[in-house]
Image (cartoon, rainbow, N blue to C red):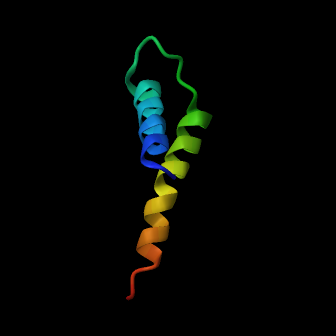
Amino acid sequence: MSDSEMARKLAELDRLLNDPETRMDAGRVWVLAQELKAPFARAGASRPG
């Protein structure tokens, strides 16, 4: 995931969680959280024990 794509997803997640004008979409929050977690999970898995 590129830096700009990650920034866009983080901004969307922030808006969903913190903007009182935006309707909460729990499904979208979970999807974004999973997508944002994936690059870090892969990086951690590749580190030797």
Report the front residue among 2 and 42: 2
Q: Position of residue 47 (x, y in %)?
A: 39, 81
Report the front residue among 2 and 16: 2
Q: In this view, does 15 lie above or below 30?
A: above
Report the front residue among 24 and 13: 13
Q: Extreme bottom residue here?
A: 49
Residue at x-position 53% and y-position 42%: 32
Residue at x-position 49% and y-position 42%: 5
Q: In this view, does 14 lie above or below 31?
A: above
Q: Which quadrant of the figure has residue 6?
A: top left
Assign the C terminus to one quadrant of the image. bottom left
| Left or right of 43, for residue 26 | right
Q: Where is residue 23 in the image (x, y as percent from the top left)?
A: 53, 17
Q: Extreme top residue here?
A: 21
Q: Position of residue 12 (x, y in %)?
A: 47, 30
Q: Where is residue 15 in the image (x, y as percent from the top left)?
A: 43, 25
Residue at x-position 48% and y-position 60%: 39
